[in-house]
Image (cartoon, rainbow, N blue to C red):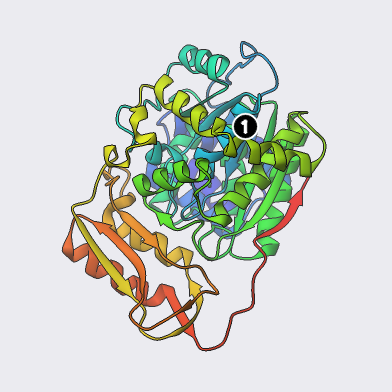
């Protein structure tokens, strides 16, 4: 078999065999196939797609590119969650401690930023000392002790995805149903959780732009999980505007902590309750959605979720003082404001553009080796549908470079739309696929 022939076969729209897919995945993982051929292969998949059988072969090949974590040393049912990626999506930081506080084990393996979207691992690394690179033994010990731990992908866990993910990020091959489905599900299966809740984003700031494509992605992932014996549920949620108000690594950590203090944005809380309640139901804590929501509300009100986050930070060697002293997080040197050019109702705060602007401020990777700036980002002051006056501050900017502020402001010109009429309200959670 030659990579050239397999790339050409997919480029011409033919179906690949299990062996051909495995040859590419293992060859790339073992450094036998160079980046340029894998990039062409990924682009051929991006353009021509894969059918369900090919997606299943790709997912399996990725799972077997490394080791599968055996979580049997963790007592009780283990539930994982994963988002397909959005802008301002800090749900993991809120949900993981809440679910652990409810008595379910959450051994969470998270990713870094991808494309214009942020990643949980980058966010957590803005907490001084927080170790996202624990040994398997320490990971299991912390989950058994506190109920949860959050780590990045290890070298051994789906190494194929680790390499492919980084290559997709810089070759415009992220928003592809087969590539996302295999990336997400290979990690979820290999990381050993019994049950999985997925948050599939749809809208301008998501990799799936239409509801039909998000639904298709959700259905494929749910059936990949269920076929491999891991009960999987997917929630489809709106990502046309950023989630919450904060976008940028340390700013999002603050907003997540505020949400655990019951002082967070209502859309973020609503989504955390929706995903969290599915996790409680899968975990057998209750079979009533209302009761699950009551349990989670109680966990927030009593401060149990916040305490759990503090415990997790401490166990993972992070500075737990951030819970009450936000100045312990990385601080940007410059602040600026973006103001409304006219009065009226906000019709659009385009999540893709906001994500791009925050990346341009320094929060995202431009190449695989970019050092990201954890302190920069934005705080939005409004949501779509809000009424504003001319000159109202729409966006507060946190940056370390005046030139980058200028560039970000010109992106905001395209991101924000204000009109005289009131916009129609869009659904926030579209559907739950079981
Ligand atoms: N999250 C992942 O883990 N992989 C993708 O491809 C997209 C989002």
Instruction: Out of 427 and 52, give the one closest to the viewer.
Output: 427
Q: Report the number of numbered marks.
A: 1
State the residue at coordinates (42%, 53%).
Answer: 115
When asked about the image quadrant of residue 91, the answer is top right
Residue 16 visible in the shown view: no
As drawn, 416 above or below 149:
below
Instruction: Out of 281 and 233, give the one closest to the viewer.
Output: 281
As drawn, 433 above or below 401:
above
When asked about the image quadrant of residue 313, the answer is top left
As drawn, 429 above or below 288:
below
Where does label 1 land, which residue?
99
Q: Residue furthest bottom?
A: 420
Residue 139 image point, x, y percent: 49, 18
Say which element carries label 1: helix
State the residue at coordinates (45%, 35%).
Answer: 162
Q: Is residue 369 left or right of residue 233?
A: left
Residue 216 image point, x, y percent: 71, 55
Instruction: Out of 223 and 61, give the one closest to the viewer.
Output: 223
As drawn, 79 above or below 112:
above
Residue 333 image point, x, y percent: 18, 52
């Amino acid at each position: 078999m030659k990579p050239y022939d397999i790339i050409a076969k997919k480029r011409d729209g033919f179906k690949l065999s299990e062996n051909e897919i495995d040859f590419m995945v293992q060859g790339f993982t073992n450094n036998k196939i160079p980046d340029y051929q894998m990039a062409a292969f990924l682009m051929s998949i991006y353009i021509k797609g894969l059918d369900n059988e090919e997606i299943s072969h790709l997912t399996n090949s990725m799972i077997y590119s490394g080791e599968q974590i055996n979580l049997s040393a963790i007592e009780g049912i283990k539930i994982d969650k994963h988002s397909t990626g959005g802008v301002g999506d800090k749900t993991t930081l809120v949900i993981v401690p809440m679910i652990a506080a409810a008595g379910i084990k959450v051994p969470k393996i998270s990713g870094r930023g991808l494309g214009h979207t942020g990643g949980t691992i980058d966010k957590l690394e803005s907490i001084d000392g927080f170790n996202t690179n624990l040994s398997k033994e320490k990971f299991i010990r912390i989950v058994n002790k506190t109920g949860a731990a959050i780590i990045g992908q290890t070298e051994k866990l789906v190494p194929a995805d680790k390499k492919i993910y980084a290559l997709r990020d810089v070759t415009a091959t992220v928003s592809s149903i087969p590539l996302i489905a295999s990336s997400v599900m290979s990690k979820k299966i290999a990381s050993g959780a019994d049950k999985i809740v997925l948050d599939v984003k749809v809208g301008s700031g998501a990799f799936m732009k239409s509801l039909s494509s998000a639904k298709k992605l959700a259905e494929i992932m749910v059936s990949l999980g269920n076929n491999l014996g891991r009960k999987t549920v997917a929630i489809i949620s709106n990502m046309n505007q950023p989630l919450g108000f904060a976008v940028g690594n340390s700013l999002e950590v603050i907003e997540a902590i505020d949400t655990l203090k019951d002082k967070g944005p209502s859309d973020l809380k609503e989504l955390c309750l929706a995903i969290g309640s599915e996790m409680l139901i899968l975990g057998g804590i209750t079979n009533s959605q209302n009761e699950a929501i009551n349990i989670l509300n109680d966990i927030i009100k009593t401060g149990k979720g916040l305490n759990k986050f503090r415990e997790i930070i401490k166990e993972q060697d992070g500075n737990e003082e951030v819970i009450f002293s936000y100045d312990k997080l990385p601080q940007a040197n410059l602040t600026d404001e973006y103001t409304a050019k006219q009065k009226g109702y906000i019709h659009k705060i385009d999540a893709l553009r906001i994500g791009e602007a925050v990346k341009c401020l320094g929060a995202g990777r431009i190449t695989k080796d970019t050092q990201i700036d954890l302190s920069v980002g934005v705080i939005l002051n409004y949501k779509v549908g809000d009424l504003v006056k001319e000159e109202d501050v729409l966006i507060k900017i946190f940056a370390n470079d005046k030139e980058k502020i200028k560039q970000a402001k010109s992106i905001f010109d395209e991101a924000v739309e204000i009109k005289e009429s009131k916009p129609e309200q869009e659904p926030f959670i579209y559907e739950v696929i079981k």
